[in-house]
Image: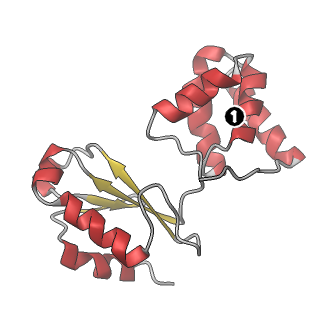
Amino acid sequence: MSRIKVELKKKDVDTIREICKSFNNLPGELINVLHKAQHTFGYLPAEVQEVVARELNVPVAKVYGVVTFYSFFSMIPKGKHPISVCTGTACYVRGAENVLAEFKKNLKIDVGETTSDGKFSISCLRCVGACGLAPVVMVGEKTYGRVSPEMVKDILKEYDE
């Protein structure tokens, strides 16, 4: 997948600088800065990472390493309604892979991708702490439990606009 070049506006750069400043530009606050930046921009393209690195006086490679190590961070834009399928042990044993396959089939995208209309994206999680409800799917902040492949179309219909 080729990298999309993002052109940051001056106000975006200023916003990133303010985020860094709110954590006193301390290198030890890198993860907190990245969390806040992702919350603000929706994802962390290389251009955002470069400004963070400069403001915290850390190498860009270190920022990139943190962004790529932690699955919470994303370098690609997520859909308006991000779908996360838990593939932890309990969910996996109870059929999460079939639920995931059904989402991929219905949306015609793979894990890590976003639909062309920007409405949905799919990712996998390791555990959401609701093992008794396995398999579990989250759409944004809403949690769905005991999800079967047959339920996928109805879940997606809830987000028709």
Point out the residue furthest to the front here: 1
Residue at left 15%, top 64%?
A: 146
Give left or right: position of 97 versus 119. left
What is the quadrant of residue 137 in the picture? bottom left
Asked whether, in this view, residue 78 is left or right of residue 123, the answer is right
Which quarter of the picture shows residue 95?
Answer: bottom left
Residue at mark 1? 49
Left or right of 135: which side holds 47?
A: right
The image shows residue 72 at horizontal and vertical percentages of 46, 41
Against 132, residue 127 (above or below) is above
Amino acid at the residue labelled 1: Gln
Q: Hey, which residue is sitting farthest right in the picture?
A: 10
Q: Nearer the viewer, residue 56 or 6?
A: 6
Q: Position of residue 83 (x, y in %)?
A: 40, 62
| Kind of element beneath mark 1 | helix
Q: Residue 100: x and y, percent?
A: 29, 63
Q: Residue at x 67, y 16 (%)?
A: 26
Q: Determine whether 155 is above or below 81 in the image.
A: below
Dot 1 crowding, Cα within 10 Å, few <14, some 14–19, many 20+: many
Residue positioned 59% across, 51% down in the render? 76
Q: What kind of colouring is applied to the model shown?
A: secondary structure
User: At 82% from the left edge and 50% from the top edge, which residue is drawn?
Assistant: 7
